[in-house]
Image: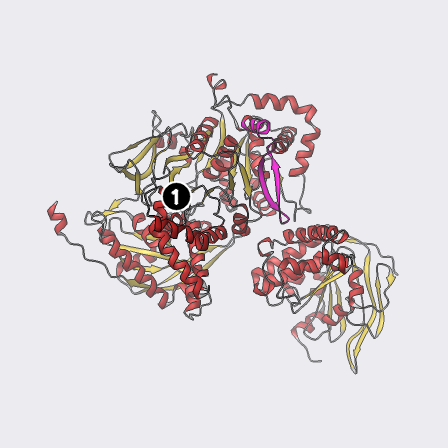
Amino acid sequence: MKDTEGYVTADGRQIGGTLMEMRNITLKFGGVTAIEDISFDIHEGEIRAIIGPNGAGKSSMLNIISGFYTPSEGEVWYKGEKRPPMKPYQVARLGIARTFQNIALFEGMTVLDNVMTGRLTHMTAGIAAQALWWGRARDEEIANREVVEKVIDFLEIQNIRKTPVGRLPYGLKKRVELARALAAEPSLLLLDEPMAGMNVEEKEDMSRFILDVNDEFGTTIALIEHDMGVVMDISDRVVVMDYGKKIGDGTPDAVRSNQDVIDAYLGVAH
Amino acid sequence: MAYMSEGAEGLRSFPALLHRNATRYGASPAYREKELGIWQNWTWAETEEEIEALALGLLEMGVAPGDFIAVIGRNRPYLYWALVAAQMVGAIPVPLYQDAVAEEMEYVMGHCGARIAIVADQEQVDKVIEIQDRLPDFERMIYLDPKGLRKYDHAKLHDYRAVQEQGRKARDTHGAELERRRGALGYDDTCIMLYTSGTTGKPKGVVLSNRNIIETAKSSSEFDRLGVGDEVLAYMPMAWVGDFIFSIGQAYWTGFCVNCPESPETMMTDLREIAPSYYFAPPRVFETQLTSIMIRMEDASRLKQRMFHHFLAHARKVGPKILDGHPVGLWDRLKYRLGEMLVYGPLKNALGFSRVRVGYTAGEAIGPEIFDFYRALGINLKQLYGQTEASVFITQQPDGEVRSDTVGVPCTGVEIRIAENGEVFFRSPGVFVEYYKNPASTADTKDPEGWVATGDAGFIEEETGHLRIIDRAKDVANMADGALFAPKYVENKLKFYPNILEAVVFGAGRDRCCAFINIDLTAVGNWAERNNIAYASYQELAGHTRVLDMIQSHVEEVNASVAQDEMLSGCQVHRFLVLHKELDADDGELTRTRKVRRKIIGEKFDDLVTALYDGSESVYTETEVTYEDGRKGRIKATLEIRDARVVPVEKKKMAAE
């Protein structure tokens, strides 16, 4: 793996070395090529965005990172090692957590229980001990609950702690999803359209939380987002995709002035 | 230096009271706060250690006696400690309203020349940073919650716990100095400075001495027999004098425990978990709670609804009598007991009132319906009348003499006098020292003999000795035909309807009264849902024909009731409109304690007032609004103006006099 140096952002933050690297990724579904020969990297501590018009292959890329899809060609490098094909739960154990574009929470369970499920990868006690709530299972739950409570405090959802998720409005559900992902204490957090369908105020809140998560825990964040304004405001570096190809990569300012990107968004004849 | 030897039981300051509590009640809880889902607890002994650590940290920063320290944030133990730590080093704490916008904070911090601000979180830090260049005396800030502050310039910014840690380390260096300053605190030294919200003009800094607060806390605690085992929930703004009296004054005097909610949104849950024995809330809170109970009852099963209404009717009949110790028949008593088991008990538990021994409401008139509802359930809810200049207490209702239309008898040590024009004056040990840097206003309010003008018009009932407040003295006026005009009287009657959040009545010097109405979004929204009325915004709902019909019927009922009052029958509302925006403190229309600023509203909505009086049927208006983050925007609306039926007043009563 390339031993890259970190860099310093415009607002003076020190970004670490490479955490994840995608090398020449291609993904095919039968005859359809969803992603074609894309390479990019994610540095430790940065907010990395993947943008592009509908059908550009952004979600597919996120699904490859999270282990949901296995690329047809190419390699995924994580923490300096080549990652073999893995199941999503194995990827989760490596410290990669994600949220979903269409909220995937347990609607009938409370916010607290939902967020607790984010700790599953940190629980080792057997089913019998857990059922009896005894010994290590009990100590584990107390320790995990503390982590979960810190996340609840951080995302300011104390008042809905005991509310079933099904009763919550959309914007709050999105926040609960983020809470669940954060509860896993990930080293890489994947956000699939965290602001889709939100109003301006909810978007501002969510942006604030994303920046705070990055700032407070130093979590590396990779996100897909449609709202260009938001992306340009909060990201350190942006990958732009169009029709399964990478057409731009760099700081928001560099990407904004890239002619291919402008064409992709404003539309030219293909 | 006579005041150095004085003091209640030899205790002349809050640091002294703190030391007594740490010695006498060392192991009992002084503060609780829900954090990470669990109630965290600090005993009096631990509290003293925490406060001393912060005080030493402040000495390390070079705080001098007489410095002002601003404290901004929601109710948290740490911020209460900050107040007492400031006192301990001889500084003067100035709590500010946490929801104040930056300009308001700039005025207050500039006026007192605060050198240090102790603030809760990033939101407050941002506001202070915005104004700090315009505050020549301001030096540094201490923050409590580090969230989001990592990237800030920490040259003038300090973490609260780090300051405490430095203080602990510097105990050897500054310990003696701290002892010296703590010992030098006198009974007539300034205890705290609180800025009044001011229904008119700029806020004024009310200087209250240790004597004011300690004497008041002592007599009021004795009045209600408060003791070390009592529990309060601290959720009212820290900048409000009442919170200071309850959460610091009485708490330090009696040693009871102050509980702080997890967040403002969890207040109701926390209230239920703590079940305080001593509780204070403005009428608005009781109204909101009652509204939410009624709304939720409508969703309950038929059986529960019938039980609720049946036993509630019985409670309204005999509950207040039982509470006041009046004779009630055996059958009624038994039935009330049954109701307690089936309805009142569970209801009180859901509200967090299971253990309330003494509850107070003040600040505004409370609707008799609402007041009686809580009394009927067996909650000892009483009224008190007070203001910042009196260290709160002027009059309060003794147990067994509670009524919704009076504010009670003078508190221990308080004298009351009614002036020629009906204005209420008082004199008491709690009377404030002065308005800071404002001798002219001090002289206007307080005469050399210590009598203070309240600004309220009222009278004392001959037979009971209870004080009744009619309105703000300056708002009481005459209409064009000479009839008495008391807007508050009518507004309160309107506000007693759950659908009406706020009302502003105009009529001074005019031939008739007209009103602005604000709908209550929760109550009206729920009503709309039940009646299949679709609406997209507050503005649309407020302008809906059926909402207007409903409000019109309320106004007409109020007119009928106002017509009964011989003195004020001229105050019936002839025309009204429903405002397109909620009146808001951020727009300067209400004070931070949510009192209507009549004059400002009249000027701001001048076009609407004109339309009310010139007979037009609708009016187009544009209004500037301020969002929570301080940005401004404009909203446009066309408002319909309705005529309300008024009850003709017979003139023969006048002739008979």
Residue A165 rendering spot, x and y as whole percentages: 60, 63
Horizontally, is B463 left or right of B339 in the view?
A: left
Q: How are the residues colored? A: secondary structure
Residue A127 rendering spot, x and y as whole percentages: 76, 60
* Residue in the image at 36% along x and 68% along y: B546
Residue B582 rendering spot, x and y as whole percentages: 42, 56
- Of residues A4 and B549, the one drawn nearer to the viewer in this rendering: B549
- Of residues B374 and A176, the one drawn nearer to the viewer in this rendering: B374
In the figure, B201 relative to B176: above or below?
below
- Of residues B472 and B13, the one drawn nearer to the viewer in this rendering: B13
- Bin the neighbour count of mark 1 within 10 Å (Cα to Cα): few under 14, some 14-19, many 20 and up: many
Confirm whether the magenta stretch covers residue A121. no
Magenta stretch: give its range: B17-44
Residue A106 occupies quadrant: bottom right
Chain ID at mark 1: B
- In the picture of the structure, the residue carrying the numbered disc 1 is B199
Residue B609, can we see it? Answer: yes
Residue B478 rendering spot, x and y as whole percentages: 23, 46
Q: Residue furthest bottom?
A: A31
The amino acid at mark 1 is Thr
Q: In terms of secondary structure, where does tag 1 sit?
A: loop
